[in-house]
Amino acid sequence: MPHANRRSTAPSRSTKSRSSQSSSWCSRTGFASLNSRSSRTEADGSSGPAAVRINGSYGEGGGALFRTVLSLSALTQRPVQIDRIRGGLRKPGMNAEDLAFLKLVCDCTLTEMPEVNLGDDTLLLAPRRLPKGTTTSVDVGTFEKGSPSGSACVLLTGIAPVLGRALGYSELHLVGETHGANMISFDAMERSLFAAWRRMGLVSIPVLKRAGFGAGNHGEILADIEPGRIEGVHWAKRGSDIHLGATVTYGELEDGIAERAGARLEAQLQKYGENVDVEIVQVATREPGIHVTVYADCQPGFGSAQAAGRRGTRIEHVVDQAMAGFAEWYESDATVDMFLADQLLLPAVLAVGDSTFTTPQITRRLQTMAWAIKQFIPIPITIRGTEGGPGTITIQRGSG
């Protein structure tokens, strides 16, 4: 891969494989009939299509709710008004990441960017058309002076399900963080989330052009998104054909640190199986950093955990942190980890056929996203279990 030097600590290494709407769409997926049964409320008193009113402080009340709502507005062609955006967080209102995601939604629906600013807590959006393939570049830094926090990976994972159901291929250039402490990393996104999505038929092919380690340190991601038919999945029980792996991504560090991480990962992963692939990846970056991701593909079943290096913290502690998070999922019998569970919801709603998967922990974010989906589409989403405990998620999409 360009701009990265890769080497594996394992005797043999897995082969990598990379390949660099109209109303009829609604009819094919059943969205047209679903929308006709949805309740509508006028947001602005106009005679145009009614807008869905969303309380942005509901449930988790953060950015995931904002992105889910905008995605559904684009996919269903329902205007939306969101009030109290990020109202569940200590710092409410739209941030640079939210504005960057809004720009992506507007680009793929040929909609003029609304006149909104940082900190605004209300948004009215009326997409002009169903999503189409797009070639666009979005930089989180465009929307705030300095080096604002904002993840290129969050932007890509948010918009990919939308563009996966568009007419035409999409090519994206996204600038923002790629390896942070409190967001999905490029490696977890590529190895776990996108692997699970590919099993459903949603194909996104990312390339890390430059890494951005930590808040305000911006990297670059290039991504191709292929439109296609998404299929429901039945992942009620984890498979036995398991591939274990880990990735140590680093840049601008003294020699030996990444190798220590790789050796510790390989030793700790051996207790779970002999087929282990530990990869050390040196990347282009503007600032020093290191990030550890551990993952497993259980066919069926996907999960990962990650940890970011910090100044003054020994790399062995970073590895142990990632391994502890991985063990929390892997030593359960759940088919997907608790973060992947909410990322599967929207593709499952867009799929042909029902979906089932299990998680070791039902999160408030999962519950919030299920609620948001139901504001646009009255589709049966059943979450069996209680918040904080294990659960089973079922989406009854039908044959479409």
Image (cartoon, helix red, strand yellow):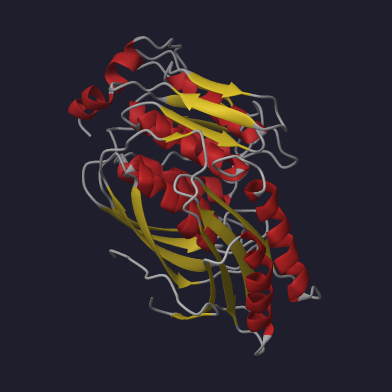
Assign the C terminus to one quadrant of the image.
Answer: top left
Q: Is residue 209 left or right of residue 332?
A: left
Q: Position of residue 66 (x, y in %)?
A: 54, 36
Q: Does 181 appear above or below 72?
A: below
Q: Position of residue 165 (x, y in %)?
A: 29, 39
Closer to the camera, 244 or 231? Answer: 244
Q: Which corner quadrant of the image does residue 61 belong to?
A: top right
Residue at image x 33%, y 27%? 353
Residue at image x 70%, y 68%? 319
Residue at image x 36%, y 31%? 350
Residue at image x 67%, y 88%? 256
Q: Position of residue 117 (x, y in %)?
A: 55, 44
Q: Is residue 141 visible?
A: no
Assign the N terminus to one quadrant of the image.
Answer: bottom left
Closer to the camera, 108 or 208? Answer: 208
Q: Does 397 appear above or below 89?
A: above
Q: Does 131 appear above or below 289?
A: above
Residue extending farthest to the bottom is 255
Q: Position of residue 322 (x, y in %)?
A: 69, 61
Closer to the camera, 397 or 301? Answer: 301
Q: Is residue 309 left or right of residue 135?
A: right
Residue extending farthest to the right is 312
Q: Which corner quadrant of the image does residue 16 belong to?
A: bottom left
Q: Does 143 appear above or below 218?
A: above
Q: Give the number of marks.
A: 0
Q: Is residue 323 visible?
A: yes
Closer to the camera, 61 or 198? Answer: 198
Q: Is residue 379 left or right of residue 325?
A: left
Q: Which corner quadrant of the image does residue 108 belong to?
A: top left
